[in-house]
Image (spheres, helix red, strand yellow):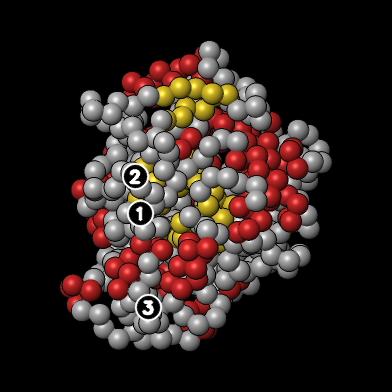
Amino acid sequence: MECGGVRAGCTRWNGAVHPPLSAPSLRNRTAAVAAGTLGCGAVLRQCPFKSPPGSSSSETPLRSHTSCSSTASVLHPLPPRSVPLSHRGFSPPCRPLACCPPPRPPPLCHAPPQSTMGDHHASPVKALMTPYMLGDLPLPNRMVLPPLTRGRSSDDHIPNTDLMGTYYSQRASAGLLISEGTFVSPAAIGWPAAPEVYSDKAVAAWRGVTDAVHAAGGRIFCQLWHTGRASHSSFRADGSCGVAPSAVAIRDDGGIHVPGGGKAPHEVPHAMTVEEIQATVGDYVAAAQNALAAGFDGVEVHSANGYLLDSFLQTGTNRRTDEYGAGSLDSRFRFLREVVTAVTAVVPANRVGVRLSPNGVFNDQGSPDFREAFPYFASQLDAFGLAYLHVMDGLAFGFHKLGEPLTLADFRAVFKGPIMANCGYTAESGEEAIASGSADLISYGRPWISNPDLPRRFAEGLPLNADASMATWYSPGPEGYTDYPTVDEAGAGTKTEPTVEAAEGDAKGVKAL
């Protein structure tokens, strides 16, 4: 019997490591997909309470079967693994926008617009601390570290194994860690010193990070990221622009951070062809396979905040008239469906999450029909049996004001799997969301930067460390990254309460994943 939460008879988390699928299993399954003997709509599902993929345990062997989703689209055969993971001949010469105002600092998301998240809680939380069975993966609590870009990889986007391994393992007491956004291909790059997962060198570097997390008793997913039009030609040697459903640039909001420092105006992106869309599906599959090879316990498909997949969902950026166009909700959803279908053919569906930002305005987004569109998208994702739906329901990161904001209840009505809530939650509001059943998991961003032992602080009602300085959010090195003390290391000092302005910064310049 599957356990969806705290229930008598549930297997309790004991800190065991959950390795990914074995390499032979991945190769066999990928070959079947590429050969057409196993459709891309097939979803590998695991029986609950069995050994995790790749486990050597003989007591509870893994059993799996395939079942095809009736809503899955039929894909063209995915490119073989040997195909270079880049967009070849994608774009004409880039056309920069006319102007670029002075740069603004790019604060992170996940901070509330009212009050701060550093209060000393009068009552320790309880619901947030209850164990949870995420598919076949036991979590010790409901608190999740969401993807937070921190810019500690190399200039060529290779993870800094020692530094990043320390950072993530320090936060391994989270129910689940989700890596910072990780590029699925060279064409996906759009942020300096953010990591990739498409090269063998990056896979080897990530393996050291995931090993450190597992040694600390943690669990970690890799967020698969393609920045789409939120990129710049300076990130690629061939000078190709970012890509998008249509040639519609981000209306200038201060420009984009580029290699070497500083900012540049947003460029008009290249409108992808159907063949390029299909090749990009293959990029996601290869990246998902690499994530498992790197030791991640699962993956999250990033379809939020105006990046590539989200831009196909939104009417302002999707002006196509073909099968991926804005003529219907199903056409707008087609690309995301194909990516999720293909990824769940090589990663068990209950180890795959998807992130959406229905209320968000970041990267010039917002659709007039969002109240109809996003519940529809969520209902279609429900058919896959995903690990979770990661919903940025909070408004702390900006709201497009195109109607009443969508709430967790709107998604709970159409998505029957686990829901992870995000953006602006405090200990109190997160506790309420879990206790009421509105959400199954809560992801906290900014508080985790300066509080590596955040679950303990919430559980015991302890004060938080002072907020991290914005100056060190993306700077290289350990300062502002791995040098924050735990309660045991420094004692629970008095929290310096920042003002709303200090906590929020300039909302238009926010960087979020």
Q: Please give the residue where the numbered disc 1 appears in the rendered image.
A: 131
Q: Residues within 10 Å of mark 1 (few under 14, many from 20)?
A: many
Secondary structure at numbered mark 3:
loop
Q: Which residue is painted at 40% across and 63% down in the image?
A: 128
Q: Residues within 10 Å of mark 3 (few under 14, many from 20)?
A: few
Q: How far apart are the alpha carbons under marks 3 and 1? A: 19 Å
Q: Which of the two discs, 3 and 2, sits closer to the camera?
A: 2
Camera-nearest label, 2 or 1: 2
In the rendering, which numbered label is found on residue 299? none
Q: Can you give x and y, in whole percent of width and height, for residue 91 in the image?
A: 65, 40
Q: Distance between the residues labelled 3 and 2?
A: 27 Å
Please give the residue where the numbered disc 2 appears in the rendered image: 10
Q: Please give left or right for residue 464 compared with residue 510 in the image.
A: left
Q: What is the secondary structure assignment of the residue under circle 1?
A: loop
Question: Which residue was labeled with disc 3?
Answer: 123
User: Label 2 neighbourhood size at 10 Å, few (<14), some (14-19), many (20+)?
Assistant: some
Q: Position of residue 285 (x, y in %)?
A: 49, 32
Quadrant position of residue 296: top left
Q: Taking 23 as reference, is 309 above or below it?
A: below
Q: Which amino acid does label 2 sit on?
A: Cys
Identified by mark 3, the residue type is Ser
- Asked if the residue under mark 1 is in contact with the one under mark 2, i.e. CB atoms within 8 Å, the reply is yes
